[in-house]
Image (cartoon, rainbow, N blue to C red):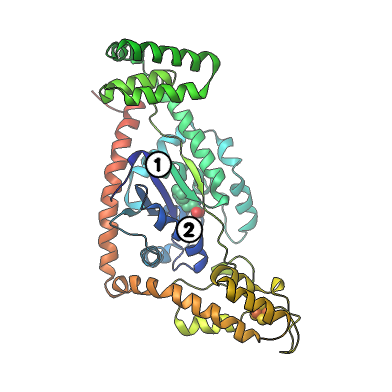
Amino acid sequence: MTTENAADTVLSGMRPTGALHLGHYHGALKNWAQLQHRHRCLFFVADWHALTTHYESPESIRQHTIDMVIDWLAAGVDPQRSTLFVQSRVLEHAELFLLLGMGTPLAWLERVPTYKDQIANLTDRDLLTYGFLGYPLLQAADILIYRARWVPVGADQVPHIEMSREIARRFNALYGRDADIEARARLAAARLDDAQRAQLQQLRRAADQDGELDKRDAARALIAASALTRAEKDALRAQLDGGRRTILREPEALLTPESKLPGLDGRKMSKSYGNAIAIREERGSVETKVRRMPTDPARVRRSDPGDPARCPVWQFHLAYSDEATQAWVQRGCTSAGIGCLECKQPVIDAILREQQPMLERAQPYLDQPELVRDILDDGCERARAAARATMAEVRDAMGLRLG
Ligand code: TRP
Ligand code: SF4
């Protein structure tokens, strides 16, 4: 890890679905690879989440995990910068899930939109289980245990992040009470110089009485800039937050921009629609798949003009081609000046060009799968150390520490 800022931790996870496709690359993975240059990043395989829906078919989890992590590495997620790990190997997630479950109202779980949707849609499975109801709570534990600030996810996951925020807030309100805070804050304030102390008092009063949020921020900045010890600063901040300690941080969704790339048939790219190109698709197969792509149905014969707006190939040109090529498509298609195969060739070339560095990055891991295992071993250990530190505080706050 390099220039990380622990206060700005990014965390995200994916269920182990096996090899990923270009939609995953243009949606999530490219984003992850960029984030790791600016933040401390943790990325994990949510294998327990896979079992919430696929508890009857665990056979594929192991291989899917390896294949998916190889694609993360292929896409440029760098194990020197980011911590890559597997959820089920950091048992502390399960402990936090259990403890959070004590005070989480059932209604919060039942009203998550994905809950009723999935039960209605995935009719081939019985999802009326305790595990599936707990899906977003487990996700909250995944996030809160690292005190992550940012969670890059697609729009469908935003309700889960919202619920994680509510759970953190409730946890801090229930268990962050601290009777000594006033006394400790008074001692800390006494160590400020007179001008700072007077200013802080004024800001705090304005924040409390008028609910002025910027006053609270200004007070926080004053505390941060002071020469106090960390414990003294903590006490002043806790006082500012109404005498509650922030044990679990409220995370924020970092909305992943929609991938510009649809599937081969123009619908959303998805393995289950059979319209996907894998990140590590073979060259010949890329060529065949693009050549077979449907085009504007009005172009029955080569001499019929077409309309790119009605053609999924045009969406690929929008994602991959420069302006000159796009102009060539527009002109050639509407005048029947070019054929569809001709039109598709630059798309094929662009996909192969994009995949080349990914294939090269993946090769060592395909040759030596034990390298992937080493990366995950190392990442699991780092994740565990961070998770353990949070759990020590959580246990303590919930009255589970003896002596
Ligand atoms: N539910 C997420 C998905 O289906 C996967 C996930 C599990 C996750 N735990 C997470 C994502 C924590 C972000 C943070 O995509
Ligand atoms: Fe689609 Fe290109 Fe054929 Fe026009 S020429 S219909 S844009 S593939």
Dividing the picture into quadrants, the one containing residue 370 is: bottom left
Q: Residue at x 45, y 82 (%)?
A: 283
Give the x, y percent position of residue 210: 55, 15
Give the x, y percent position of residue 318: 59, 69
Vertical position of residue 199 compared to residue 9: above or below: above
Q: Which residue lies furthest to the left in this view?
A: 403
Dividing the picture into quadrants, the one containing residue 86 is: bottom left
Vertical position of residue 171 compared to residue 351: above or below: above
Between 183 and 50, the residue placed more toward the observer is 183
| Residue 193 shown left or right of residue 165 in the figure | left
Between 117 and 85, the residue placed more toward the observer is 85
Give the x, y percent position of residue 289: 55, 81
The kind of residue tagged 1 is: Ala
Q: Residue furthest front?
A: 324
Which element carries disc 1, helix, strand or loop? loop
The kind of residue tagged 2 is: Ala
Mark 2 surroundings within 10 Å by alpha-carbon count, few (fewer than 14), some (14 through 19), many (20 or more)? many
Question: Which labelled disc corresponds to residue 137?
Answer: none
Give the x, y percent position of residue 112: 59, 43
* Residue identified by numbered label 2: 28
| First reached walking from the N terminus: tag 2 or tag 1 | 2
| Residue 127 shown left or right of residue 60 in the figure | right
Mark 1 surroundings within 10 Å by alpha-carbon count, few (fewer than 14), some (14 through 19), many (20 or more)? many
* Residue identified by numbered label 1: 148
- Asked if the residue at label 1 sits under 8 Å from ligand 1, the reply is yes
Q: Residue at x 57, y 80 (%)?
A: 290
